[in-house]
Image (cartoon, grey):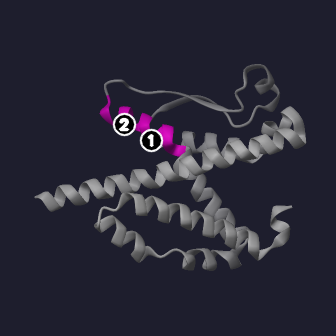
Amino acid sequence: MINIIKYTLITTISLIGIFMVFALLITLINKKLNKYLYWIFDSNSLTITGIIGVPVHEVSHYIIAKLFNHKVSDIKLYRPIESKNDGVLGYVSHSYSRSSLYQKIGNFFIGIGPIIMGPLVIAFSFRILIPHLCGNIISSININSYNTLIESFNIISLINLYISDFYNIVMIILLSNPFFTI
């Protein structure tokens, strides 16, 4: 019984940990990137970079809202002109039945939709745009290390491994083509 609780806890922390670490890394990268883009492109930087990111973000909310049977009343994938007035680059307006537990649970998944869909879109884009790097990236990740750390409940080392793998993936991409960063 204790093993079941232990493995359930380990699995839950691992799954949440993946999202938390990547969300933290994306937030840190986003802050730096926005600073540099603002310096280069002035206040239009978010409008320029949002051309791809905002529609992906909003479509992920939309797809999950539909999966959880929410009624979508309005969707704006990208609104650069209006955003200058209200700061909103896109949105999905939806409603749900408050008596439905399934639809209430859906609110959580709608909220984390971009965290799930964003990496999938990035992975798919890598597969299409730079297929020769996909094998290098996949081979650089040691799944056995993750399994060992999860089984030993070594959370700190697991987080360090996530960060190390993220760094290695970025380095593989950057070192494969020096013009990738230009």
Q: In this view, does 66 lie to the left or right of 170?
A: left
Residue 115 in percent (x, y) is at 54, 48
Q: Can residue 48 be seen in this view?
A: no
Three-letter amino acid code at the position of disc 2: Ile
What is the CA distance from the residue labelled 1 to the residue labelled 2? 7 Å
Q: Name the residue under label 2.
A: 105
Q: Is residue 166 visible?
A: yes
Q: Residue at x 56, y 77 (%)?
A: 140
Q: Mark 1 points at which residue?
A: 109
SS of the residue under disc 2: helix
Task: Name the mark on residue 86.
Answer: none
As displayed, is residue 84 above or below residue 53?
above
Q: Which residue is drawn at 85% across and 68% down?
A: 179
As displayed, is residue 136 above or below residue 108?
below
CB under 8 Å between callouts 1 and 2?
yes
Is residue 105 part of the magenta span, yes or no? Answer: yes
Where does the magenta region start and end? 100-113
Q: Which of 101 and 108 is in front in this view?
A: 108
Image quadrant where residue 83 sits: top right
Image quadrant where residue 10 sits: bottom left
